[in-house]
Amino acid sequence: MSRTNVAAPSESSFLTDIKTLRERARKHIEEGAVTEDYKADRETVLRLLNEALATELICVLRYRRHHFMAKGINAEPIAAEFLVHANEEQAHADSIATRIVQLGGEPNFNPEGLSTRSHSEYVEADGLVDMIKENLVAERIAIDSYLEMIRYIGDRDPTTRRVLEQILAVEEEHADELSDMLHDQ
Ligand SMILES: [Fe+2]
Ligand SMILES: [Fe+2]
């Protein structure tokens, strides 16, 4: 007789059996992607994600302002790069909003209080060098806050962690590019 449906002892010792998994999945179906095995504090994760969303939106606005206002002999390639960054920050905002909804929350796009919820600041800056410096400061703030969020989440919510890690890698590229620009001035 074959015993194909019986899990090997090494598997059953750490895996939840299929029947329990399926029952749990059916029980709270309205919770969408959030299952009983979700180990993080969802309210805290949602609050952190909404702060990150506000940060990204402020970065979109600051980079766009700088894109249109950059003037001077070296301005053209830098203005173009500011626009590239603005669009990448918008993509970050979108992936954060997507994750908030997956976790059963609501993305906060309310312009009221946006700059208070954001970690980074909206600084208009005067001249190309100041613009580059302000953007570098904002990127460094974003890098620190993403690192902190990633450490907080640990292995309790791998999907959110992966979203944040992907964003973090781009913020590090941004900071690196800005610091190169600053050295060229
Ligand atoms: Fe970003
Ligand atoms: Fe960035």
Image: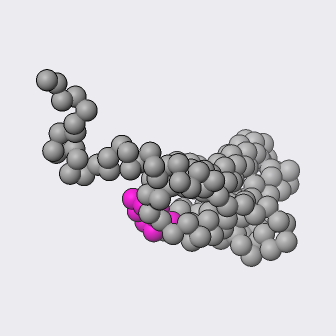
- Residue 39 lies, with reference to residue 9, above or below; the image says below
Point 75% across, 63% down: residue: 108
Q: Residue 157 location, x and y as percent?
A: 46, 57
Q: Residue furthest front?
A: 1
> For the N terminus, which image quadrant?
top left
Can you tell which quarter of the image residue 126 is in?
Answer: bottom right
Query: Residue, x 67% and y 54% (percent of image)?
Result: 101
Which segment is the magenta one? 149-156
Asked if one can make out residue 163 in the rendered structure from this viewpoint, the answer is no
- The verdict on residue 1 being magenta is no
Q: Is residue 6 left or right of residue 185?
A: left
Side of 2 where 103 appears, left or right: right
Q: Is residue 1 left or right of residue 164?
A: left
Residue 24 percent across, percent down from the top left? 46, 53
Q: Quadrant of residue 53?
A: bottom right
Judge whether 158 appears above or below 154 on screen: above
Q: Please say whether residue 80 is visible from this viewpoint.
A: yes
Which of the colour schemes (rainbow, by chain, secondary structure, one colour) is used?
Answer: one colour
What x and y, as percent, mark residue 130?
72, 64
Percent x, y of residue 142: 59, 63
